Amino acid sequence: MAETGAYIYAACRRIEPGALDGITGLRDAPLRILHQRDLAAVVSTVDLDEFGEEALRHHFEDLDWLEQVARRHDEVIRAVWLASGLVAPFRLATICRTDDNVRERLETRYDELTRALDRVEGRSEWSVKAFLPAEPVNAAADTDDEAASTGTAYLLRRRRELDQRQQAAVDADAIAEAIHHEVAVAAQACRRLPPQDRRLTGYADPMILNGSYLVDDRDAGSFRAVIDQLVAQRPAVQLMVDGPWPPYSFTTLEST
Amino acid sequence: MNEVDARLQSQPISVVDLLDRLLGTGVVLAGEVVISMAGVDLVQVHLAAVIRTVTDELETMR
């Protein structure tokens, strides 16, 4: 028989037996809840032929595989989130050899996991992205036709174009920083992720901010009001808000 | 609006946003009894995604 492991989706506290009925894990394996003191881990059995170290390295290159696993991982996280009201999502593909190993891990990281869960209790993650159209580089400004034909004029024009591009990048950074700051004030915690490639976002304009914000669920309304205010203040910038999501970005343990 | 109501209205997440988070953040366990993709290079994943997006576009154009 092939070797198996225990794939961990999330940690939580107080989850009713039966709360996850109807939800299955990867490859439709049944979910199990493992307890250690007042913590619980939601796991399912995976085949190490598919989820072993060597196999993972190979599958990681396969975006369809990655997407499928990430989707199921997320479904379980969201089910735990809805059922128990509190969840610490685990990094994709965290697998222990045995159930006992999972409980040992919950015990060794007990304090940190407890602090992480405390940090996100009653709070959700929101994503705020900002897109800024690139300014057209105004090359022909104040150049008269005769001068433009000389070598010196050409070099001057090239330099002006470069200066404008550099200035535009500096301006975009400043705008992103200002928006991030204003949004962060309305949140309990924040984290900037690298802006996503234009080919992935489907937007013509470059992403200048990819921010994650941990917001108290009671403050969701005022958080949205801050965004609406920013939209009104900055017509040149396109803002995209998503959420509420499980607190994916805010349960990283201190020592990792 | 109470907590659960707010969460039931939660939006699905795009796969790019999801991978940003499930590969870049979240609880990481390490140790000899654990297999994990903690060291995953996000740039690689994004690169793979970009290549696929571009390939898909080219196929649609045909």
Image (tube, rainbow, N blue to C red):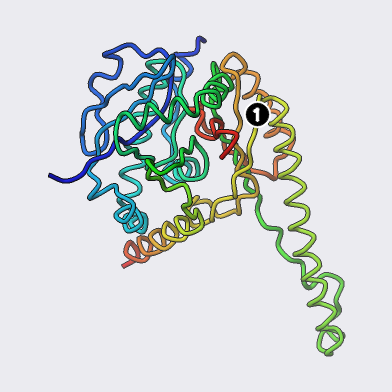
Residue shown at the point (83%, 90%) measured from the top left: A151
Report the front residue among B62 and B29: B29
Q: Where is residue A55 drawn, in percent x and y?
A: 29, 54
Residue shown at the point (30%, 29%) measured from the top left: A99
* 10 Å crowding of disc 1: few (<14), some (14-19), many (20+): some
A142 on left or right of A178? right
Depicted A159 relative to depicted A40: above or below: below
Identify the subunit bearing mark 1.
A
The part of the image, by quadrant, that contains residue A120 is: top right
Residue shown at the point (29%, 47%) measured from the top left: A51
The part of the image, by quadrant, that contains residue A14 is: top left
Report the front residue among A230 and B38: B38
Q: Give the residue number, with chain letter if any, for mark 1.
A: A189
Which kind of residue does numbered mark 1 sit on?
Answer: Ala
A148 on left or right of A245? right
Residue shown at the point (65%, 53%) measured from the top left: A133
Q: Where is residue A242 drawn, in percent x and y?
A: 52, 33
Depicted B52 relative to depicted A234: above or below: below
Q: Where is residue A171 drawn, in percent x and y?
A: 78, 52
